[in-house]
Amino acid sequence: MNQQTANDKPDVVIPSIQRGKYQHYKGQYYEVIDVAHHSETREPLVLYRALYGARGLWVRPFAMFFEDVMIDGAARPRFAFVGSPAHTSL
């Protein structure tokens, strides 16, 4: 039986990302840490931390992180870059 695993898949290029502070379209701020990939599908995921509350870590598919959302009939970025890592409040 021939099963394909993540290790059998060709290397996937991980997209680059500008690390730093981003604002979500709902107003909260997050620090983008890096891009990782899913262990099984190799899908690129953005690793980021909330800059409020318990400051939890999150991952979101790369394409979804940078897609536009419709707000009151206008397209806006889901997350907008607002500052380099040196400007984040850690």
Image (spheres, rainbow, N blue to C red):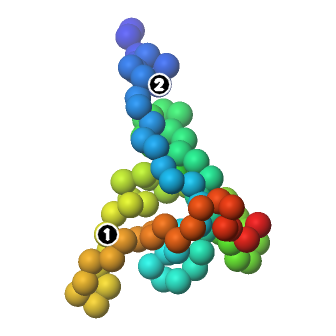
Q: Which residue is mark 1?
A: 68
Report if residue 48 is visible in the image. Answer: no
Residue at 41% across, 31% down:
13
Q: What amino acid type should be assigned to the residue bearing mark 2?
A: Ala
Q: Which residue is mark 2?
A: 6
Direction from residue 29 to residue 51 in the image, left or right: right
Residue at 42% across, 52% down:
62
Quadrant where the C terminus is found in the figure: bottom right
| Residue 78 image offset from top left, x and y in percent | 41, 71
Q: In which quarter of the view is residue 76 placed?
A: bottom left
Residue at 53% across, 45% down:
35
- State which tag comes first along the sequence, 2 or 1: 2
Q: What amino acid type should be assigned to the residue bearing mark 1?
A: Asp
Report if residue 14 is visible in the image. Answer: yes
Direction from residue 78 to residue 49 in the image, left or right: right
Residue, far bottom:
72
User: Which of 79/64 is in front?
Assistant: 79
Q: Nearer the viewer, mark 2 or mark 1?
A: 1
Q: CA distance from mark 2 to mark 1?
A: 30 Å
| Residue 64 image offset from top left, x and y in percent | 38, 59
Task: Work out whether 76 lies above or below 44.
Answer: below
Binning the other alpha carbons within 10 Å of mark 2 as few (below 14), some (14 to 19) or many (20 upward) gives few
User: Which of 6/88 is in front?
Assistant: 88
Residue, far left:
73
Direction from residue 25 to residue 47 in the image, left or right: right
